Image (spheres, rainbow, N blue to C red):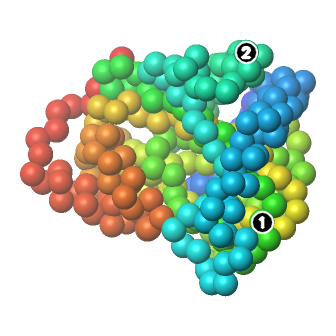
C-alpha cells in the first residue's frame, strides 16, 4: 500500500507547485486524509497550544474522567463496549459567534491562545478550500460560498484527551465514523498514536508527526464534489500507556447553507443523480442519531427529504 500522504505546503510557492497540487489531488481522491507540514502556523505557537492543553487536562479534566470510569465500572468490563468512547473532551465554538469567553475552567492565557489558534486554522482552512477548488476546476471561492449560508460558516474545535486504557480491545478511544461537515484540521499528539483510517478494507495508522496538521474531508465535500472526493471512515484506538492529545477543528457549512453537488462537476459525469440537495442543519440533526453508522443511508434519507422539500438556490456571500 502507498505511504500516507504528507504535503509540504511551502512548496506551493516554488517550481514544485504543480507536483504539490497533484499530491493534494491524489490524497483527496484516494485517501480522504493527508498530513500538512510547513502550513504557516509556527512550531513555537503549536508547542504553546500543546502545553496549555495538556496542563488544562491535568488540572481540570483528569480527575473527572477517572471518576466517570469508576462510576461506570469501565476498568472491569468483560465484553466489548459499543455505546461510549474512552475520551475526555470539551468544545469551543468560533463561528458564527465565539463561546470561548463563556467556557468554564479555562485560564486566560489558554483562552487567548485557543482564540488565536482558531483564527490561524480558519485562514488555513479557507486556503485549503481554494486549493481544492483549483484542483476541481471550480472558480476560486466556490467552496467557501457553498458553505456560507446567511451568517457565514460554522467553525468549532473539539479538544480531546485519550487517557491510558486498561482494555483497549474492548473500548475504542473513538468509534469508527465519517465526519459530517466540511474540512477538518487536526493537531494531534506526536508521541502517542491511535488515529486510524479505513483504506481498501484495512485500518491504516495516521502517523504522528511533530508540528503537522492532519486534514480530512467530511461528508459535505463528498456531496459538493459529486463523489470525486470522499469522506473516509476513521477511528481512535485507545492505548494502554500514554495520554493522547487531539485538537480537531471543523470548518463546516453554516446551519442554513443549502448543500448540493456543484453543477460543473455533475455535468462531467454520466450518473447525474448520485447525491441529494439539503440544508446542512437537517443533515446534522440526522447525523447526531446515526454518527457511528455508514454515511450512505444518511445520503438516502436526505434524498427522500429532498423530494418533499423545495430548496432554493445556493446561498452566497
Q: Badge 1: few (under 14), some or many (20 or more) residues near its Cα, within 10 Å?
A: many
Q: Secondary structure at mark 2?
A: helix
Q: Nearer the viewer, residue 205 or 199?
A: 205
Q: Measuring from the top left, give residue 266's x and y in whole percent.
A: 33, 49
Q: Nearer the viewer, residue 205 or 143?
A: 205
- Please say whether residue 251 is visible from this viewpoint: yes
- Label for residue 165? 1
Q: Measuring from the top left, give residue 52's x and y in whole percent.
A: 81, 29
* 47 sits to left or right of 252: right
Q: Badge 2: few (under 14), some or many (20 or more) residues near its Cα, within 10 Å?
A: few
Which residue: 46% across, 19% down? Answer: 97
Contact between labelled residues 1 and 2, with CB atoms less than 8 Å apart: no
- Please say whether residue 129 is visible from this viewpoint: no
Q: Nearer the viewer, residue 210 or 28?
A: 210
Q: Secondary structure at mark 1?
A: loop
* 295 sits to left or right of 313: right
- Where does label 2 land, which residue? 108
Image quadrant assignment for residue 19: top right
Which residue: 66% across, 40% down? Answer: 159
* 201 sits to left or right of 50: left
Q: Measuring from the top left, give residue 259's x and y in whole percent.
A: 32, 41
Amino acid at each position: 500500500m502507498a505511504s500516507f500522504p504528507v504535503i509540504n505546503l511551502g512548496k506551493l510557492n516554488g517550481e514544485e507547485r504543480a507536483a504539490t497540487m497533484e499530491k493534494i489531488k491524489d490524497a483527496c481522491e484516494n485517501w480522504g486524509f493527508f498530513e500538512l507540514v510547513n502550513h504557516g502556523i509556527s512550531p513555537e505557537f503549536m508547542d504553546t497550544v500543546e502545553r496549555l492543553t495538556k496542563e488544562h487536562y491535568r488540572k481540570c479534566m483528569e480527575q473527572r474522567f477517572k471518576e466517570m470510569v469508576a462510576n461506570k465500572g469501565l476498568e472491569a468490563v468483560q465484553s466489548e463496549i459499543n455505546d461510549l468512547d474512552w475520551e475526555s473532551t470539551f468544545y469551543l465554538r468560533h463561528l458564527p459567534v465565539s463561546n470561548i469567553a463563556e467556557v468554564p475552567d479555562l485560564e486566560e492565557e489558554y483562552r487567548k491562545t485557543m482564540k488565536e489558534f482558531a483564527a490561524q486554522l480558519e485562514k488555513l482552512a479557507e486556503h485549503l478550500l481554494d486549493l481544492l477548488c483549483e484542483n476541481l476546476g471550480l472558480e476560486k471561492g466556490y467552496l467557501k460560498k457553498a458553505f456560507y449560508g446567511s451568517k457565514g460558516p460554522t467553525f468549532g474545535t473539539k479538544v480531546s484527551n485519550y487517557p491510558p486504557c486498561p482494555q483497549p480491545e474492548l473500548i475504542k478511544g473513538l468509534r469508527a465514523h465519517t465526519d459530517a461537515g466540511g474540512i477538518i484540521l487536526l493537531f494531534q499528539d506526536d508521541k502517542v498514536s491511535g488515529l486510524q483510517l479505513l483504506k481498501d478494507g484495512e485500518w491504516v495508522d495516521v502517523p504522528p508527526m511533530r508540528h503537522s496538521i492532519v486534514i480530512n474531508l467530511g461528508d459535505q465535500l463528498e456531496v459538493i464534489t459529486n463523489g470525486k472526493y470522499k469522506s473516509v471512515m476513521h477511528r481512535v484506538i485507545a492505548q494502554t500507556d500514554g495520554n493522547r492529545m487531539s485538537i480537531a477543528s471543523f470548518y463546516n457549512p453554516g446551519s442554513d447553507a443549502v448543500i448540493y453537488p456543484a453543477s460543473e462537476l455533475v455535468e462531467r459525469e454520466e450518473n447525474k443523480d448520485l447525491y441529494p440537495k439539503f440544508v446542512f442543519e437537517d443533515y446534522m440533526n440526522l447525523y447526531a442519531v446515526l454518527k457511528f453508522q455508514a454515511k450512505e443511508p444518511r445520503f438516502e434519507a436526505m434524498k427522500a427529504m429532498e423530494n418533499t422539500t423545495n430548496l432554493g438556490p445556493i446561498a452566497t456571500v
